[in-house]
Image: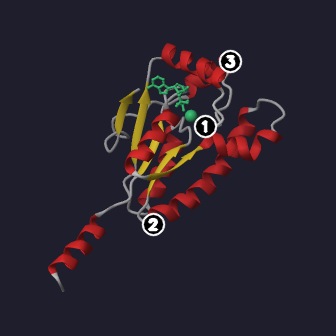
Amino acid sequence: MHLEMALCIKRVSLYMARLIIVTGPTGAGKTTYSLSIAKEIGAIRFSIDPWMQILFSNDMTSLDYSWMIERVNRCYVQIWQVSEQVLELNGNVVLDLGFTTKEQRDHFTDLAKGLSIDSEIHYLNAPKETRKKRVEKRNLEKDPSVYSFEVTDFMFNFMEPKYEIPGQQELENGRTVNA
Ligand SMILES: Nc1ncnc2c1ncn2[C@@H]1O[C@H](COP(=O)(O)OP(=O)(O)O)[C@@H](O)[C@H]1O
Ligand SMILES: [Mg+2]
């Protein structure tokens, strides 16, 4: 075998697709960061907001957290089915799926392990007051390209104690981004 070909095969086999799990509390900048890192590394990005808006917003009659979560979980199943195919083709994937709880993050980390991929958790962090201001601004801007939901003060405060900050162990293969 030519040396050049052997080197090429080695390079291909050494390359591992990346799965980036973007997490952080409301308004920390997850979607903004996901867009930029996906562009930087060349990745397929899945953000939960457009999935929920396009699939379910017309069916939403009132604000019901368990109704939402049930549908978010259905999206997770389908998003993973596509992500898995991309990763198996050695493509990078960025997941911007809320990831409020460790359990949700662990679920995707375990799925990635099944493909022998060590997922990376990128934790977006910003002070509460900064995030609140950002959400107020985002509510006014209503940028149609990102399909963000309007987040009222009530919703912001409701979600705040639900967010589980990743511990050191979760971040071993990841990073904290002070956005
Ligand atoms: N680093 C940053 N500095 C200032 N504004 C930001 C930053 N990151 C995001 N934003 C703005 O703050 C708002 C919330 O960001 P977004 O990415 O939608 O947060 P999340 O997805 O975590 O809720 C958006 O209007 C966005 O343009
Ligand atoms: Mg977002």
The residue to which callout 3 is attached is 154
- Name the residue at 31% across, 63% down: 15
- Name the residue at 66% across, 46% down: 51
30, 174: nearer the viewer: 30
Instruction: Kindly report which numbered mark, 2 or 1, lies closer to the viewer in this rendering.
Output: 1
Q: Between marks 1 and 3, how big is the CA–CA gap?
A: 22 Å
* SS category of the residue bearing label 3: helix
* SS category of the residue bearing label 2: helix
Report whether 169 appears left or right of 103: left
- Name the residue at 58% across, 61% down: 81
Instruction: Kindly report which numbered mark, 2 or 3, lies closer to the viewer in this rendering.
Output: 2
Q: Which mark is residue 88?
A: 2
Relative image position of residue 101 (x, y in whole percent): 53, 36
The residue to which callout 1 is attached is 146
| Mark 1 close to ligand 1, CB under 8 Å | yes
Relative image position of residue 34 (x, y in whole percent): 47, 40
